[in-house]
């Protein structure tokens, strides 16, 4: 290449790898772009046909905003769409992928409304839908996503016309049958939105397949507002602290990095959501406000006092609560979409589907009467015959009576919080917590798949594989 | 043969017609004639399940073929829109193809963006090019450019069509001339004389290099070089020195070629015969005596092979267009310096290029539409049942027949080679010194022939001719030198 922008290439390479790690695309689909920080008449975009998961420097193409240039001939077929979106003030990056579950949920119909609310047609008679996450992280990070039906849904003038309109209002939009587009202040911001959307879509898929209406819940959230529907607010991704490091211990840094990378690529956590920590003294923990980070990307490690502070996030409060009241020394909170969906189903089966609609229902958390998740796979049954399960309202309880604490004590450090995530702990290491988080997701996957077999192909009853209790 | 701004050169047809004293062919359409098609419904552009509609959608989305308001390269900048990209990947020829190394600031004076915005970027006192878009009949790509040159007083200096990318390459940057109004005027002159600008430009470049060698020589001149100086006469005193980077002489030399005056008489024979006359055939950048176009062979071995194998000589269209495969083919990108497997890529491109010519569609449409998409359209017109495989078979027959014709005219595998400089002088391509290797290309030739069912001398085998339905050409003896 005659011209190269090293920093931009590095950003693209990291984000491209990140998308590749979570199967966001096939070998060559998707595209990403970013404005040039040194020249406001240029942006850079991936070349048409480049491999997002393994970009090389010549895959990064300069394109002019103000007029056509040679880059228009090499850049992605969707360059014109990116150009329009990046022209909106405040937007510096756009990322598009063919995430499996985001795309799957878009295959809906106005007469079906399985995952999407039908919103009517626009002025030109084109159908519009809306997907609203029903989990806490999704509701705040994604909010709601317009899903459009397009006559020509790949690189078309129609997309060029409509996508910038949708993305002016929201960070995300989905092209039906094609995949999501995200815009943000940075490529990391885009990844945060896309990853969270994918987790929310996964959760919605699994909940719906168990027979529970997503759209009813979505309508309730929209009607009441997420601040009223959910009892707490999650922390949001803060790019300004990504490089903050209160730790120099390389062993600890490597440990956190390994856990973060694992969670990311195994879809245990969405980038920028969740948290993890290690208690390092009687009154201190090393805390990362993320539970999942792709290889090579920055993450903060903060040294925090265990005393509660007014501006503590929900996650921070949970970590502190656990360290103050148990012998656990490591903690992880991950989005675990399948586990969370499964937890929601179990609560709805036991206490009525009003619980999914945000109703505060009195749940017994007595030793002999409380909700649990029962694995059906052999290793999980062997290691951890039950996972704890609580409703989301328990996140407000900062007392030593919070049932989450007993769940962690009694179920080897694993508690599913329906609608929120999985809290996993370890008495000694983060690895122990990581094991719980990843097991929880696999447990949920087995339960879900065997349940589908039961319903679709007349397979054995899923519950018949749950271990017996007293 | 000339159609106002478009000259059908480089095939030899003009020479053949001229030798038969055919001056013109005039066509006067009878508007009462209706052309019928086999399947009107399939041909209906509003039929969304029809092949014409689907092809149109592809054109509308393709980066090169979509409309100007969607930043389509060809619609926005004409063919000259290719210049910036070709140069960015070090493929753009320079100084009679000695190298490919231009200053970016020079290219930016003559690329597609420059033509498009010339009124805004022209310097004070410089002639200004006003540009209007135009199109061939019914074409949505609109790559044609009608241009008018005005001087600083706003007076019209000249007007016509173009310049196209190849013209800017061969009548401009290959001579180190980066003056877009001058190149445009040179183009108009060439059009009026009915001369192909690739051939003309390359021939002038050979002339310039020969002049430079002779003039700067410190040793005794050969007989051919003395003859050159004799034919050259006082050209430099009248019209300026023909050196790379000088531009004063350009319009004058074109005029002389067109009229057959002075040294122009010898230049009018093309670069090979011109250079041969003066004992320097190595300065003619030709294959089979046809001048090479704008893409340097060292930057793309597959293109180099296509040039070598083209039956009509150095051609990137009928011979196969692969130059852009290394940077503009999506996930079909083929690196320019790749060797293993390249003959097959070149062969496929030859067949595809020939099929496009047979169909009679514009090459630019094939940037978006494949033979798979053309075939049903052809069927809708003709009532045939063709597919892309059928079209490629037609192409295979065509190039095999052309090959046999060439052989009968005395062409052999020894004619399937680029000029020596591409094997001897490296150029910088994406940071690496690059040149072609004779050993490698010798092997690639054999693989190319074999891929087409030709023997190792490039003669179509009888079994191939039989498979192609060309039995009447079997069992003949084709003499090879």
Image: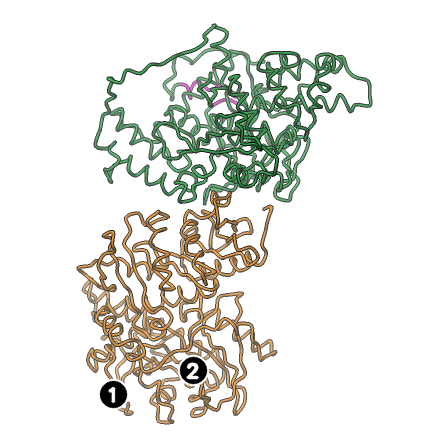
Chain colours: A orange, B green
Instruction: Name the dominant secondary structure of the magenta segment.
Output: loop
Left or right of B333 on screen, residue A380:
left
On the question of residue B131 being in view, the answer is: yes
Extreme-bottom residue of the structure: A400
Q: What numbered label is drawn on residue A363?
A: 1
Instruction: Looking at the picture, tell me which residue is in the foreground, A401 or B186.
Output: B186
* Camera-side mark, 1 or 2: 2
Where A319 falls versus B356 (above or below)? below
Q: What residue does disc 2 label?
A: A313
Q: Residue furthest right?
A: B219
Q: What span is in magenta? A: B454-465
Element on which disc 2 rests: loop
B460 drawn magenta: yes
Percent across and percent down for residue A12 are: 51, 57
Q: Is residue A256 above or below residue B195?
A: below
Q: Residue at x 61, y 22 (%)?
A: B251
Which disc number belongs to residue A434?
none
| Residue A243 sits in quarter | bottom right
Is residue B155 rendered to the left or right of residue B133? right
**Residue at image coords 28%, 66%:** A205
On the picture, is B112 further left or further right than B433? left
Q: Position of residue B141 (x, y in %)?
A: 39, 35
Above or below: residue A171 compared with residue B138: below
């Amino acid at each position: 290449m005659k011209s190269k922008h090293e920093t931009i290439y590095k950003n693209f390479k990291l984000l491209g790898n990140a998308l590749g790690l979570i199967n966001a695309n096939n070998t060559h689909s998707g595209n990403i772009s970013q404005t040039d920080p040194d020249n406001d008449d240029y942006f850079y975009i991936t070349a048409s046909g480049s491999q997002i998961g393994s970009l090389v420097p010549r895959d990064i193409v300069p394109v002019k905003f103000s007029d056509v240039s040679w880059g228009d001939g090499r850049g992605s077929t969707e360059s014109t769409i990116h150009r329009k979106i990046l022209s909106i003030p405040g937007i510096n990056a756009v990322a598009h992928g063919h995430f499996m579950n985001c795309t799957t949920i878009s295959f809906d119909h106005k007469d079906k409304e399985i995952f999407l609310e039908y919103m009517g047609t626009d002025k030109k008679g084109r159908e519009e839908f809306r997907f609203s996450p029903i989990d806490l992280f999704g509701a705040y990070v994604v909010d709601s996503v317009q899903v459009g039906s397009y006559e020509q849904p790949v690189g078309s003038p129609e997309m060029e016309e409509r996508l910038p309109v949708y993305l002016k209002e929201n960070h995300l939009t989905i092209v039906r049958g094609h995949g999501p587009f995200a815009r943000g202040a940075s490529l990391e911001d885009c990844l945060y939105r896309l990853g969270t959307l994918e987790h929310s879509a996964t959760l919605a898929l699994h909940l719906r397949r168990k027979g529970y209406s997503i759209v009813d819940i979505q309508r309730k959230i929209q009607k009441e507002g997420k601040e009223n529907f959910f009892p707490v607010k999650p922390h949001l991704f803060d790019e300004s602290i990504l490089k903050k490091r209160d730790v120099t211990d390389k062993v600890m840094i490597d440990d956190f990095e390994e856990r973060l990378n694992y969670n990311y690529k195994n879809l245990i956590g969405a980038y920028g959501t969740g948290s993890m920590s290690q208690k390092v003294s009687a009154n201190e923990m090393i805390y990362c406000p993320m539970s999942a980070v792709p290889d090579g990307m920055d993450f903060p490690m903060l040294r925090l006092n265990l005393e509660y502070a007014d501006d503590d996030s929900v996650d921070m409060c949970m970590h502190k609560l656990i360290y103050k009241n148990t012998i656990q020394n490591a903690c992880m909170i991950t989005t675990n979409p399948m586990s969370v969906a499964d937890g929601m189903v179990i609560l709805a089966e036991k206490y009525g589907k009003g619980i999914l609609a945000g109703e505060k229902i009195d749940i017994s958390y007595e030793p002999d009467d409380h909700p649990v998740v029962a694995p059906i796979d052999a290793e999980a049954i062997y290691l951890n015959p039950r996972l704890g399960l609580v409703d989301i309202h328990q996140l407000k309880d900062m007392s030593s009576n919070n049932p989450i604490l007993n769940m962690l004590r009694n179920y080897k450090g694993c508690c599913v919080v329906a609608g929120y995530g999985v809290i996993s702990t370890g008495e000694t290491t983060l690895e122990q917590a990581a094991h719980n988080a990843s097991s929880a997701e696999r447990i949920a996957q087995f339960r879900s798949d065997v349940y589908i077999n039961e319903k679709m192909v007349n397979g054995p009853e899923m519950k018949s594989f749950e271990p017996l209790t007293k | 043969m000339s159609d106002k701004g478009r000259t059908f050169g480089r095939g030899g047809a003009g020479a053949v017609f001229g030798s038969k004293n055919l001056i013109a062919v005039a066509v006067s359409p009878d508007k009462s004639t209706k052309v019928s098609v086999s399947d009107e419904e399939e041909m209906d552009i509003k039929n969304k399940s029809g092949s014409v509609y689907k092809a149109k959608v592809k054109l509308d989305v393709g980066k090169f073929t979509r409309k100007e308001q969607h930043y389509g390269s060809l619609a926005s900048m004409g063919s000259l829109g290719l210049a910036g990209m070709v140069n960015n990947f070090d493929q753009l020829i320079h100084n009679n193809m000695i190298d490919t190394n231009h200053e970016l600031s020079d290219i930016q004076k003559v690329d597609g963006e420059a033509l498009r915005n010339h009124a805004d970027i022209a310097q004070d006192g410089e002639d200004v090019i006003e540009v209007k878009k135009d199109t061939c009949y019914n074409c949505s790509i609109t790559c044609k450019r009608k241009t008018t040159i005005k001087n600083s007083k706003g007076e019209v200096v000249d007007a016509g069509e173009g310049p196209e990318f190849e013209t800017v390459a061969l009548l401009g940057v290959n001579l180190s001339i980066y003056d877009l109004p001058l190149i445009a005027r040179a183009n108009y002159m060439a059009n009026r004389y009915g001369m192909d600008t690739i051939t003309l430009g390359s021939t002038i470049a050979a002339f310039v290099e020969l002049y430079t060698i002779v003039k700067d020589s410190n040793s005794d001149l050969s007989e051919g070089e003395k003859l050159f100086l004799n034919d050259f006469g006082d050209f430099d005193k009248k019209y300026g020195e023909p050196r790379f980077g000088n531009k004063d002489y350009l319009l004058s030399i074109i005029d002389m070629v067109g009229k057959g005056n002075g040294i122009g008489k010898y230049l009018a024979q093309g670069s090979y015969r011109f250079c041969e006359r003066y004992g320097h055939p190595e300065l003619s950048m030709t294959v089979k005596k046809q001048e090479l176009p704008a893409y340097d062979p060292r930057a793309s071995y597959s293109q180099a092979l296509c040039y070598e194998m083209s039956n009509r000589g150095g051609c990137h269209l009928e011979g196969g267009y692969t130059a852009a495969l290394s940077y503009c083919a999506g996930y079909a990108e083929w690196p320019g310096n790749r060797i293993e497997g390249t003959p097959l890529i070149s062969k496929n491109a030859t067949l595809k290029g020939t099929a496009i010519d047979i169909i009679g569609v514009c090459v630019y449409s094939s940037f978006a539409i494949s033979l798979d998409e053309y075939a049903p359209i052809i069927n809708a017109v003709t009532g045939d049942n063709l597919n892309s495989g059928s079209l490629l078979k037609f192409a295979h027959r065509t190039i095999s027949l052309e090959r046999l014709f060439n052989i009968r005219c005395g062409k052999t595998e020894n004619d399937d080679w680029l000029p020596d400089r591409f094997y001897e002088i490296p150029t910088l391509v994406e940071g690496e010194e690059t040149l072609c290797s004779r050993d490698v290309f010798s092997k690639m030739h054999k693989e190319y022939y074999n891929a087409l069912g030709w023997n190792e001398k490039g003669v179509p085998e009888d079994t191939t001719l039989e498979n192609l339905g060309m039995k009447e050409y079997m069992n003949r003896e084709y003499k090879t030198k």
